[in-house]
Amino acid sequence: MTRGNIHIPDRLKPFVRAIGYIDGGAANSVQYYADGTPGIVFQQRDTGLFACERSAKIPDSYVFGQTIKPIVLQAPKNCTQISIALYPHVLQSIFRFNASEITDGFVNLQELPDKPRVEAIAQLWETDDPQQQLRLIFRYLEALIEKNTAEPDKGIQYAVNRIWQGKERGAFKDLHRELNVSERTFERKFEQQVGLSPRLLANIAQFQASLRQLKTGKYQRLSDIAYENGYSDQSHFIRSFKRFTGLSPFQFTKGSPGSGEMAESFYF
Amino acid sequence: MKQLLKALFFDREMVAAIKAAKPSKEQLYAELISGRITMKEYIAATRK
């Protein structure tokens, strides 16, 4: 499967950011770092489920919230997993519960109300064709959105985009004025829909920008990354990096023991 | 009215029936999305 041959239906485009597909391969560990992305995962039970040290059992289909603490999942050999990465602000509009309820956590899809029927998803693994599998998932999501008459909040979407582009580092007062709401109302709505405070999302955007630069090697000293991404100094950058990865930038570049592939490498 | 209140508060059978009544997943979900219960409480109640 390639990026070019995935067709996300127009109705889902405001919600779905990317599709992840893991099919086969050796047993591996997959790292998840804070990236502002909630989502939905479907795993084929017969080929083995991902395992996590934080939770005894990971269900075969679940909705996950924002990630703050780094997490490593163990993927069994030859497993199949499809993940739907959502935009940061759409979880509440699709599922209607407060997004912060599942920040750093997940909820089993089977534990949510039965309509639209998750059983449609049971057919998912009757076919090996990824396109057919995605069509089933898209149909399920469309039914869910139809049922909840969901539309993402345009104001929060605007705020998320501004924060993600790095234009609002620490300047949230202007944002709530632009949206014509009080600071407290803005923060409360933002947390309900995104699952994070505006400040924390800004910290994650800053961390992701520095992570990209670190991975591409476009720097001479670590302090270059710190200053180019708006950190006050190198130690501020290292503290923030450790918070979101559990590693120092130096340990990260050397590859710590047990570190595996990053989750984003499976997204199309 | 008095009879109804008496039935509601003093009828042991009725109180037991109300306590034992299991709300549907949809009812619990409505409580969750209105913020009256947390996700933890919702999951605990649906697993009962």
Image: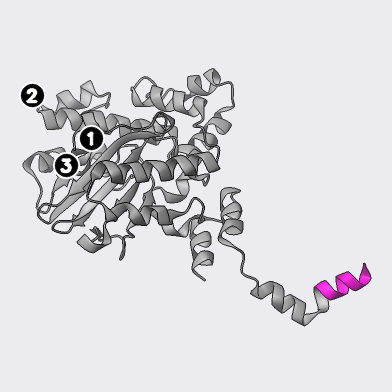
What residue span does the magenta drawing correspond to?
A: B1-8
Structural distance between the alpha carbons of marks 3 and 1: 28 Å
Give the side of residue B16 with respect to residue B48, left or right.
right
Marks 2 and 3 in Cβ contact (< 8 Å): no
Chain designation of label 1: A
Q: Which residue is mark 1?
A: A268
- Number of labelled discs? 3
Coordinates of residue B32 in the picture (x, y in percent):
56, 53
Q: Which residue is mark 2?
A: A220
Coordinates of residue A92 in the picture (x, y in percent):
49, 41
Residue A250 lies in the magenta stretch: no
Q: Residue furthest bottom?
A: B12
Marks 2 and 1 in Cβ contact (< 8 Å): no
- Residue type of the residue flagged with mark 2: Gln
The residue carrying pointer 3 sits among few (fewer than 14), some (14 to 19) or many (20 or more) residues within 10 Å by Cα, namely some
Q: Residue furthest right?
A: B2
- Residue type of the residue flagged with mark 3: Ser
Disc on the earlier residue, 2 or 3: 2
Location of the C terminus of chain A by quadrant is top left
Write the residue at 58% across / 21% down.
A180
Disc on the earlier residue, 3 or 1: 3
Chain designation of label 2: A
Q: Nearer the viewer, mark 2 or mark 1?
A: 1
